[in-house]
Amino acid sequence: MPAVFLHGVPDTASMWSPLLDRLSRADVVTLSLPGFGTELPPGLDATKEAYADWVTEQLVELGEPVDLVGHDWGCILVQRVASTRPDLVRTLACGSGPIDVDYEWHAMARLWQTPGAGEELIATFESTPAADRVAMLVAGGAPEALAREQVEHMDARMGACIFSLYRSAVTVGAEWQPAIDAMQPQPSLVLWGADDPYVAPRFGECLAARLGGELVVFDDCSHWWPWERAEASAAALERLWAST
């Protein structure tokens, strides 16, 4: 049974590299969301439902329950998949992505959700010199080395997918939390940065309580714990996997 990792926004599967380098297991699959450094298949409308269905399809193809791991939007999507297809999931580990009726989207998300404003923001970003784009992402909490990778893939296609995804998710807490609340207990782990500027750690606490899982909050850590706390995150994951 492989471990399957799902990235968030505006990342690609490469954001897992520091963490994966510290794992002792080799049976690892990193999923790349369509449109995020990859082609967008015809007919996939990049909504939260479409991406959740796409993730489910990838797990079905693997043919056995997996150790599922998600960060940011990956966290949101793996929660959804675990709540709708628990037969596909052996363990669940996730963080920095809220499905919570009390969560209010951060300022950048609200811009992306606003027709016109989101498109203008991306157009301005694309016209900015690469070094300045990296600096903008670093100012938003991304580690500099990760920001350089993000800039390489942030194009018009990714922007369009981001708009579709976020605009489909204005009320994701109200829509998807009831199914999370109804989930049967399963081996779970929640990972969070104490200084996350986008999703406060209290939402990690709520998620861990909801899942009945362990909560690990990293001090002096922003949003990208797979990158900022790769070694500690890998150790926590391997404890989870060894417990089942």
Image (cartoon, grey):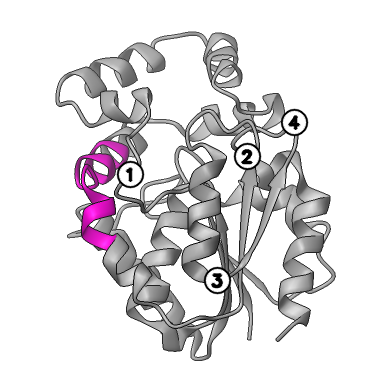
- Predominant secondary structure, magenta span: helix
Three-letter code for the amino acid on which mark 3 is drawn: Gly
Q: CA distance from mark 3 to mark 1?
A: 19 Å
- On residue 220, the disc is 4
Tell whether label 4 touches label 1 (CB within 8 Å).
no
Three-letter code for the amino acid on which mark 2 is drawn: Trp
State which tag comes first along the sequence, 1 or 4: 1
In front: 134, or 140? 140
- SS for tag 1? loop
Instruction: Write the residue at 63% across / 80% down.
Output: 2
State which tag comes first along the sequence, 2 or 1: 1
Q: Is residue 136 above or below residue 69?
A: above
Q: Would you name the residue on which mark 1 appears?
A: 102
Q: Seen in the image, is 30 located left or right of residue 17? A: left
Region of the chain picked out in magenta, as a range: 161-176
- For the question of whether residue 32 can be seen, the reply is no
Q: Is residue 208 above or below residue 232?
A: below
Q: CA distance from mark 1 to mark 4?
A: 25 Å
Tell whether label 1 touches label 3 (CB within 8 Å).
no
Three-letter code for the amino acid on which mark 1 is drawn: Asp
